[in-house]
Amino acid sequence: MRRLTAALILAVSATTALPPAAMAHHSFAMYDQSRTVTLKGAIKTVLWSNPHVVIWMEGAPVTGGAPGVWTIELTSPGNLTRIGWTRTSLKPGDAVELQILPLRDGQQGGAFKTAKLLATGQVLDANWVQKASITAHP
Amino acid sequence: MTLRTPLMALCLSLWASAGFAAESAQTLDPAPTPKDWAAVAALPDWSGVWVPDIIDQNRQIKTNPPPWNTKAAQEVLELNAAEQAGKPKGLFVDCLPNGLLALMMITHNPLEFVFSPGRVLVLGESDGNRLRRIYTDGRGHPADPDPTFYGHSIGHWEGDTLVVDTVAVLPETYLAVSESVGVANNGDLHVVERLHLTAPDTLTDDLTITDPHDLTAPWKTSRIFYRHRARQDEIGEGVCLQGKFAESVDSHGDAVFTPLQYAPDGSPLPPKP
């Protein structure tokens, strides 16, 4: 499990400190793999495009902190689709609790771990590496 | 013998001209015959979507790293340090094609194989749905091929194994071990791959990478792909540059792509509705 987590982190992890690169295909090493931050708020915008889906959410850490707009990055639409996501799995206005790996530089952004839709209790994860590497589907 | 010699000379001449023609730009590729299609039908079944084993990619790098030469090793050291510091170099952030080795070795997205007479096509998902075209019609490499991101590939079948030989890969493309650690191949890259099923739904690519500007010896490594057949697993469009734009509407009410805007700290701003 630890190896899986490490691989997930490595795969999710990759490049450049500046988030513009975050909009291109890159490593996620700018995110702090050792910490998880839980945010509560509402989805503002979803950019369902390659190479990485990006969502912006308006909210604040549940442990306190200034509210704001957080930029959250995920893998590609294809990888998310293969684990059951659709482009409307998260929609503007959805009240959510998000778990993210925060940006190391303290800016309001991070890599997506999970989302809990507060209206339904549904939890979305992004464990696409696990599916790709462990399970061969006939 | 006197009769035979001219005949042999004629045969040799015809063979030589045919051989020459096979390497000539003017050669016409013949229309496939039913026999050619029957030969395709007899090939192993590689249908479906082949999803890379990313955990194994990382395991391979740790347990069987490339034999970097001194110069490349220093570069890799620096790149690893940058990644450890949370400031990784982005090898692919420009959205140029990732290149041959990345497509097969560090991709996070699946591949699809299409067989047709004289061709094996490898279709990717990330990086703009990149395509490898592997000629299996018996031709050789051109004498002076134009370097390209995916190089010039020729292949042949040895039983159920597809053996692929690739040259003419652009020197700027990386021998990469991750999206942030890799060294330009700097030219003269030669890759031999042996692709074969190692289980009914497992495809293994055994690679021998000769990269004289980066490696002290040919590097043998393998990559694993798992077959998926569910429709939700099918390959989608994957245009890298799309991520630099938001979907918007212009003053005429027409749908347009608008470049994303960025905050002074570099983070992308949410597109305006």
Image (spheres, coloured by chain):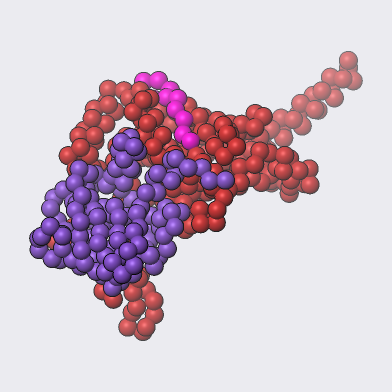
In the rendering, at what x and y percent does residue B255 appear?
Answer: 39, 76
Q: Quadrant of residue B75?
A: top left
The answer to whether residue B248 of the structure is visible from this angle is: yes
The answer to whether residue B147 of the structure is visible from this angle is: no
Numbered disc total: 0
In the rendering, at what x and y percent does residue A58 appear?
Answer: 20, 67
In the rendering, at what x and y percent does residue B23 appear?
Answer: 63, 37
Instruction: Read off the magenta span.
Output: B212-224
Colour assigned to chain B in the rendering is: red
Observer-nearest of A106 and B28: A106
Colour assigned to chain A in the rendering is: purple
Residue A114 left/right relative to B78: right
Observer-nearest of B105 and A87: A87
In the rendered view of the protein, which quadrant contains the N terminus of chain B?
A: top right
In the rendering, at what x and y percent does residue A13 appear?
Answer: 28, 44
In the rendered view of the protein, which quadrant contains the C terminus of chain B?
A: bottom left
